[in-house]
Amino acid sequence: DAKTTQPTSMDCAEGRAANLPCNHSTISGNEYVYWYRQIHSQGPQYIIHGLKNNETNEMASLIITEDRKSSTLILPHATLRDTAVYYCIALKSFGTGTRLTIIP
Amino acid sequence: DAGVIQSPRHEVTEMGQEVTLRCKPISGHNSLFWYRQTMMRGLELLIYFNNNVPIDDSGMPEDRFSAKMPNASFSTLKIQPSEPRDSAVYFCASRVTLSSPLHFGNGTRLTVT
């Protein structure tokens, strides 16, 4: 599956929107983009996924560029409990993710 | 929905011993994955099954590692003999199809002394 690239770490103020970018320039036309997060040493938790269109659920929104080479996960009102490592993957292979820290 | 169930939660063993990790996927999920997580390498895919058949085991580090899925509701990952460098958290995950979201278990923390 396609390789993804994410920033190593990000900070976001509590209550603000957290925007996490991901590059997946080699993604193929039928590969979905999935986002997961991992808190402490728990198993990764599914957040959202999409193919071409922007998606929204109770946890987050996913914006996928028209050329599908990148996407952004948006946590609209970040809370301290959103502090975690966020992974963007194409199918099954995880990279190193983005460590998101929410600052009070 | 009980989720993916892994056992044991923690395993401490001595070098050279055999270790068996167990996983019960979510009922109805046709694909099962074994991952290993360490600080150095992050989350590595070891092997995955589709309809109980191993599809890709290229991530299995060496012959000491083996995985089986005798039926749709059970899988094992065995390390024989274990070595200290095998110390890691091992996660099992399942999904309905190969293109649906992964659901992870809580992992088995393995320590080999």
Image (tube, coloured by chain):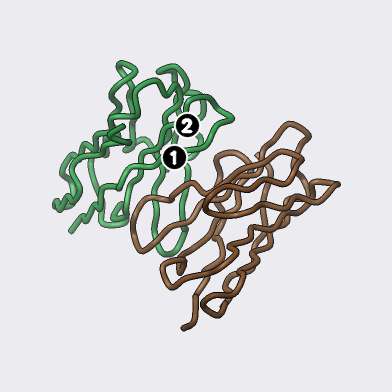
Q: Nearer the viewer, residue B38 or A16?
A: A16
> What residue is at 47 percent from the left and 71 percent from the top?
A79
Q: Which numbered circle lies on residue B57?
A: 2
Q: Nearer the viewer, residue A30 or B112?
A: A30
Tell me the shade of chain A: brown
Label 2: chain?
A: B
Q: Is residue A21 left or right of residue B62?
A: right
Tell whether A65 sits left or right of A71: right
Q: Name chain B's colour.
A: green
Sequence-first disc among 1 and 2:
1
Residue drawn where x is 25% and y is 53% of the image:
B109
Where residue A1 appears, as percent x and y from the top left, is: 65, 39
Q: Secondary structure at mark 2?
A: loop
Work out which quarter of the rendered image holds the N terminus of chain B and state it: top left
- Find residue B74 and report its image quarter: top left
| Circles 1 and 2 in contact, beta carbons < 8 Å | yes
Q: Which residue is mark 1?
A: B46
Amino acid, disc 2: Asp
A63 left or right of B1 in image: right
Label 1: chain letter: B
For the residue labelled by badge 1, is the local secondary structure a helix, a strand or a loop? strand
Q: Residue A49's x, y, as percent?
A: 61, 43
